Image (cartoon, helix red, strand yellow):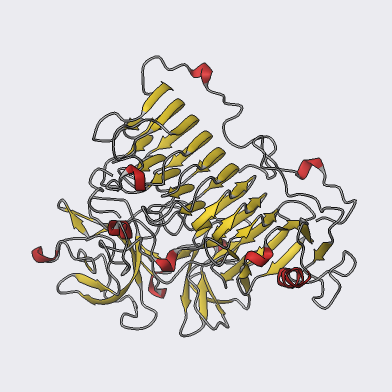
Amino acid sequence: MSTRSGLLIGLAVGLLVPAAVVGGSALGADAAPAADPACKSYWVSPDGDDTGAGTERKPWKTVERARDVLRTTGHAGCTAVVNLRAGTYQVDKTITFDDRDSGVTYRSVDGPGKAVFEAGRKVTGWTPYKDGIFKAPVDISQPFYSLYAEGLGVYKGAATTARYPNRASDDKWAPYLRSILFDPTKEAVRDQLGFNTGDIDPSWDLRLGTSWPAQVTVWSGGSWSWFTDTIPMLDINFTKKRTTLVYPARYGFINSGGGSRYFVQNSLSLLDQAGEYYLDYPAKTLYYKPRGGTMDGVTVYRPTQTQVFSIAGASANRRVENLTLDGLTIQHTDFMDWYRYGWNGTGDSGFKHKYPKYDTQIELPRNRWGAITLTNTRGVKLTRLHIQQTGFTAIELLFANEKTTVSDSLFEHLGNDGIKVEGGWPGEGDVAHDNLFTNNYIHHIGELVPGDSAGVEIMNSGGNEVSHTVVEHGARYGISIESRPEIPNADNYTGGNTVKYVRLSHLAQDSGDTGPFYAYGVRNQPPYTPDAEVSQMIIDDANADPSMPDAKPYGVHMDFGGCGFAFSDIKVTNTESDPYHGPSAGPCDTFSNVSWEAGFDDSKMQYDRIGVLPSFPYEKP
């Protein structure tokens, strides 16, 4: 961003796998291994019994039972395989693995996507309320912050928390209100938002001052449109035309004379559009408005978990190694009660770091997770997964993770990112590197966190490969590679990444100063000898909502420090701004056969290899 530099932050023996379900890529990301004949295989089924023997005829019921038995019996020298039968595995507690579980494969034995790990519970007992709205009791010990509905004609993504103004369509975030400067001395404040008369109705039941208030979701920063915050409202003053928020946003709400786009949500008073819901948590009642005025054929899920699998070694020196998850479906995870990206100021983490400014660049600790979270791992393999309808990120690689493979997987309708690599603070050890993300299809990202969402986001991590990948439909990035522009090259671990055979489309739909391919703070000092490669990439349709006040989207945006890249065979079409925008410091990348330069040769584009491969195991959206 142009002003960001000072601100941002088994199988049983003899069982054969049909070739049609082996989803390996041309780069060696093969399906999970069959059981070693010298090793014992174990079986799990949704209708099994944890007191059973764990055999094909008498399977266990839970993954946790298989895990615990393998921990006690040992499997050194074996690739132990746990075969998961088709069906639904209810997840009421995060399933955890540690270094004792190294070398084990958990696979959907009946084919990819057949073993379903369900993080939600069905809501039943619906009765009419009024105006086409239905209500149901929810017997819960804790609130939830997202909801999912399934049925004919129902949008597949997250249901919409009741909001004003109503969204234009299920897959758009606009329209918005616009904040105003309610007091000339308050331009920089981050917890008081001014509003125009009529934008917030005094008759609305916002429940301010309670434990369950209304919220705002806001592109803080005024004319900047980089990050979204979702923050509860504390109080409101209609005379002064301002509302105070419980927590500060990332930026102030006025910048360069312009206000921030926002909407109000989480009030029954705002529930008036099909697809919206409201949880009255104190009353333990859920309200939902279906299309067509009936709940017939509609199934509603309320999440119970944010994370389904946690794979975590005890430390960077004691890692989980060579564990595999193969062919699992994971769905219906939760969001959080409020969200902001990063600490607001240098050193705000409260810990001493060599580069304390990076505090503003890294997610808050409370937000460092995904439906699958990896920490302190080596050689973990996540393959042929189907992850859908998540409240936040699908897969999070947090800090020390290397030689991870994520392959042959479908990610769709995600609250935030598809795959996120969080390498930790610069200058404190290169612990996150050499990961492979290949043959993955990612679409509809950032449904709940449109700001800073990405299909693949790599933070302070190098030597990774993103290949044979499709990212479609999001408010901001397709692929983002970042560190910070003040980090010297010796302490910056973000170099040497490879991106190839990639298609990025329908991205940057609601944000500015961005592009479907984005880099920031990667190489900040000369010489800018390229050690990162981007090739055989197609970018199409980077056009923001008309309400977006920032610089219009580019195709490729190399922001401050977006240097040290060699681009070849890149085609960019249909962008609102320039197809390529380079660092303000001047040329620091190299180009060969790129569409924004004269002499582009379209015949050099390997269209048959761009995107997912023929071996992709799921039906493409």
* Residue 6: % across, % down: 22, 51
* Residue 117: % across, % down: 67, 64
The quadrant the C terminus occupies is top right
Q: Would you place residue 244 above or below residue 559 in this image?
A: below
**Left or right, 17 with reference to 186:** right
Residue 154 visible here: no
Residue 377 visible here: yes
Q: Report the front residue among 345 and 379.
A: 379
**Left or right, 181 with reference to 559:** left
Q: Residue at x 66, y 42 (%)?
A: 29
* Residue 617: % across, % down: 70, 44
Q: Report the front residue among 231 and 586.
A: 586
Q: Would you place residue 512 above or below residue 541 in this image?
A: below
Q: Residue at x 71, y 67 (%)?
A: 89
Where, by quadrant of the figure, is residue 423 drawn? bottom left
Q: Report the front residue among 24 and 256.
A: 24
Q: Report the front residue among 170 and 556.
A: 556
Q: How many marks?
A: 0
